[in-house]
Amino acid sequence: MTAERQTQENQYPGLAECETLWREYGTPDRVIGHCKAVSAAAGAMARRLNEKGFRLNVPLTEAAGWLHDIARADDYHWDRGADLAERLGYSDVADIIRSHMSYLIDSKKEEITETDLVCMADRMVKENRYVGPDERMDYIIEKAKDFPGAEENIRASFREIRALKQRIEGIIGVGLDDLLGSE
């Protein structure tokens, strides 16, 4: 199977296809581990929210998590990864990949989307494990320490992530640290 084709019966790539795509694209193992952990966290949140009456697309959420950093070693990895997903016919996945680096979570909006969950998971997973928003924020601030104004923007973004985390926990009736820390 080559990465340049999509089977008609699958609207979103499964893990096996993503593994093929990672190999074909040369995605580093450490990035693959991160993508798997993001997908697991986002998928678990989507499933729990669906149990409470939401109608989130779990296969889309998981696929976008698996592929969000497929091109992480490239400049503009969000565009390169999205372009790849588009070429394969996964436009919904591509939309999430393209926006994941600049997406601003808005904890006050009524709807919770697949993009919210993938982006939130990406901001709570460090390397290949769920660490929650605080540890991940500290890690990102350290990486951005040479960029003036970055810390303030990062802290503001993570306030929204924490607020959405708390909202989701209230809906599903379990702490995400408990749910995702064991994923």
Image (cartoon, rainbow, N blue to C red):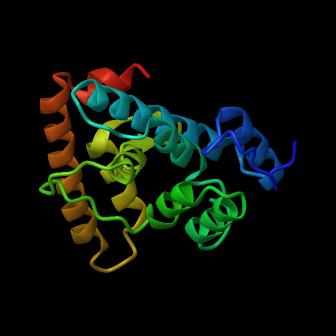
Vertical placement of residue 153 versus 5, above or below: below
Q: Is residue 92 above or below residue 126?
A: below
State left or right for residue 171 relative to residue 4.
left
Q: Is residue 129 above or below residue 160?
A: above
**Picture quadrant where residue 53 is located:** top left
Foreground pick, 164 / 60: 60
Q: Residue at x 34, y 60 (%)?
A: 141
Q: Is 160 positioned to the left or the right of 94 in the image?
A: left
Q: Which residue is drawn at 36% across and 24% down?
A: 181
Residue lying farthest to the bottom in this orientation: 148
Q: Is residue 127 above or below residue 173?
A: below
**Image quarter in which the N terminus is found:** top right
- Residue at the extreme front: 8
* In this rendering, position of residue 120 left or right of residue 72: left
Please provide percent x and percent y for residue 31.
Answer: 62, 46
Quarter assignment of residue 103: bottom left
